[in-house]
Image (tube, helix red, strand yellow):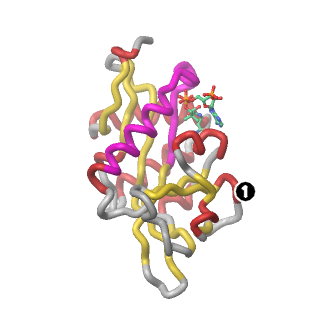
Amino acid sequence: MTEAQVSIKSEKPTQREEVHAVIKAAFKQDNEVELVKQLREAKTFIPELSMVAMVDDKIVGHAMLSPAFIEKADSERIEVLALAPVAVHPDYQNQGLGKKLVNSLLALTEVKFGDIYRGIIVLGDCSYYSKFGFVQASQFGVCAPFKCEEKNFMAMPITNNALANCQGEVVYPAAFSCV
Ligand SMILES: CC(C)(COP(=O)(O)OP(=O)(O)OC[C@H]1O[C@@H](n2cnc3c(N)ncnc32)[C@H](O)[C@@H]1OP(=O)(O)O)[C@@H](O)C(=O)NCCC(=O)NCCS
């Protein structure tokens, strides 16, 4: 696989079945496929932020960001994006595609959505996501609505200091109840 063969693009509706097959192969179960299907049906879905990694014309990876919010103690809502799921087909893992996918999502978000959303939230392996600039969400006073290892519940401001004074609990879209 050469650099020239790889492209990262927003997912097209006609690519959905191929995307589901990649997610199922990566996670070895259907929950994340169901999550993606339900997130696409939500009225908050942003098609541009569901992205695929392609090698030549073949889809081998997928990642998406979905609107969520932080609810502060005074009930103020801070708009954020939740990163999930991120999947690369097992035959193509550890070749930098996950990194390219996430970096493309982050770059697009900063340019096009940085004035709407304040930060990005992710629950995942901190050794992987820290490479992108995510830090423990608790550093911003942001907490998860479920029990998890604190170090793996992470956040990143979209622009400098955008998560200052955002202490509160993350509220995920209802679709997340399937994972
Ligand atoms: C996690 C995943 C998306 C990474 O994509 P990838 O293309 O394989 O990863 P990259 O090539 O960009 O990065 C490789 C690096 O990530 C590390 N890595 C890969 N999967 C990892 C994981 N699950 N946890 C922690 N680190 C991981 C590798 O060890 C490697 O580290 P190095 O750069 O220090 O050598 C992919 O392995 C995958 O789909 N896994 C199954 C589904 C999953 O667990 N998704 C994440 C849910 S939050």
Nearer to the camera, 56 or 108: 108
Circle 1: residue type: Glu
Q: Which residues are magenta?
A: 84-110
Disc 1 packing (10 Å; few <14; some 14–19; many ≥20): few
The image position of residue 38, as x and y in percent, is: 42, 54
**CB of residue at label 1: within 8 Å of ligand 1?**
no
Q: Quadrant of ligand 1?
A: top right
The image position of residue 24, as x and y in percent, is: 53, 35
Q: Is residue 179 above or below residue 140?
A: above
The stretch drawn in magenta includes residue 89 = yes
Q: Which residue is mark 1?
A: 149
Q: Please name the residue shown 35% across and 56% down the image.
A: 41
The image position of residue 12, as x and y in percent, is: 27, 37
Q: Residue furthest front?
A: 160
Going by the image, does 56 lie left or right of 168?
left
Q: Quadrant of residue 13?
A: top left
